[in-house]
Amino acid sequence: MLDLTGAALSPETWPFGLEWLPEDTCLVGGAVRDGLLKRQRDYLDLDFVLPEKAVETARQIARFYQAGFVVLDAGRQIARVVFEKATADFAQQEGETLHIDLKRRDFTINAIAYNPFTRRLIDPLDGCQDLQRQLIRMVSAENLADDPLRLLRAYRQASQLGFTLDRETQETLIALAPKLRQVAAERVRMELGYLLNLRSGSEALERAWKDGVLTGWFPHTCVERVKRVHQVDEMVQEFGDRWPQLWEHFNRPILASQPTNGISLAKLILFIAPEIEKAEAELKALKLSRAEIRAAIAVLQRLPDILHPEQMSLRDQYFFFHAIRPIFPTLMLLARVKGVALEAIAPLCDRYLNPHDPVVYPQPLLTGNTLIEALNLPKGKLIGTLLTEIQIAQIEGKVTTEAEAIAFAQRWLKPTKP
Ligand SMILES: Nc1ccn([C@@H]2O[C@H](COP(=O)(O)OP(=O)(O)OP(=O)(O)O)[C@@H](O)[C@H]2O)c(=O)n1
């Protein structure tokens, strides 16, 4: 049974006092939905609808509580107040009444309002019933067509909440599918990012692709590749069971400040074209950061190397790790998805996880300057080549001290001397 005891529905948990809100202000959207479902969220995300003075109210609250303040949309009168542990958006009601506002939203479960003064729900679209039935039901086909990002939101919220798509809604999603291509790339990328990062998101991604919602953005993948997305999760589990330290590596962002991690990158690769040029164009169209595109392309380029790990010499492994260390977890996952045996990859994983492994984390025996001085060499590219050759000799156990390294360099240079 639904009740009003969820955290977001208790004004006592809000970061400001109720007296700041004009009467008739209502909480709406995800906070009401999650409050009714008693979903715990680390960060409170509150959306309020006000009949008037939305921006003014937000400004006053921000000033009093010394919180961050930004006008998100001056025309539609929407402002945001950012507290330490919560964000509150204040929006002018769309249309003459709250009912009209609610009827312009995406899904019935997101179209429930809560009046904190009367402590009552306003639910003209029977969202509570759908919450109980665990159904994602559209408010109307027109609303989905008005903002086609909602198509992708349907799959994401179904996956996040463990809900089912209502049949008529799914038919509408299929009918409107091509419209997702018209949505701004930044919005699609953000929503797609949620799905790629969600543990339960693989099934929804597969469903969305089969329903045609993602085909506009990823026209070159195929059903066989998309079907493998959920295998990535299985492989994460398999690797994690054997090497518990790998969990952290899989979940670590590929680049600081970017949400893409080893797992979501592996899933993304299964959606983009296998050909480098086409893949790059797709990722650019989605406006991924340059660093993310570089990482994805490096995975595509290096994947063939890892398909026969038993054929990699120490020298190959050195160059391999040198080039791909940050994307190694993704390559491992995709190698397994492509059928490479776990035992064949195991030696590479052991190396990767050993911080003292000389192949993955080489510790040079000497610097370029030492080499220049000892052998009286000119600065230039040759020094880099020599350092690499010394490094490989060290990995192969041929040199273990600085003196041996210098002697090795001397021998290496000899055949090239007249
Ligand atoms: N494209 C969108 C985005 C949002 N909304 C409405 O605005 C509310 C708040 O949006 P947002 O905070 O983006 O999403 P939530 O539903 O709150 O949930 P989540 O944080 O999981 O995205 C939604 O519940 C929904 O009523 C909508 O109708 N169409």
Image (cartoon, rainbow, N blue to C red):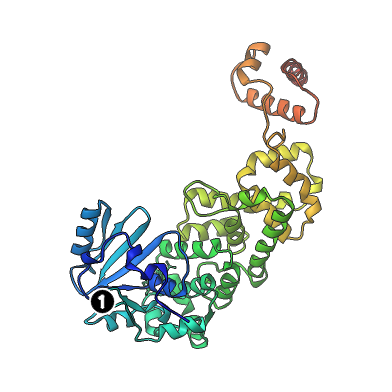
Question: Vertically, is 10 above or below 360?
Answer: below
Query: The residue tagged with tag 1: helix, strand or loop?
Result: loop
In-front residue for pair 304/80: 80
- The percent coordinates of residue 301 (x first, y second) are 64, 51
Disc 1: residue Cβ within 8 A of ligand 1's nearest atom: no
Q: Quadrant of ligand 1?
A: bottom left
- The percent coordinates of residue 402 (x first, y second) are 71, 17
Q: Residue at x 81, y 52 (%)?
A: 343
Q: Local crowd at mark 1 within 10 Å, few (<14), some, or many (≥20)? A: some
Q: Is residue 137 left or right of residue 317?
A: left
Q: Is residue 358 visible?
A: yes
Q: Is residue 348 left or right of residue 60?
A: right
Mark 1, residue position: 94
Q: Is residue 136 visible?
A: no
- The percent coordinates of residue 218 (x first, y second) are 54, 67
Residue 337, quarter of the rendered image: bottom right
Q: Is residue 202 left or right of residue 357?
A: left
In-front residue for pair 214/258: 258
- The percent coordinates of residue 283 (x first, y second) are 51, 58
Q: Residue at x 48, y 57 (%)?
A: 284
Q: Amino acid at mark 1?
A: Glu
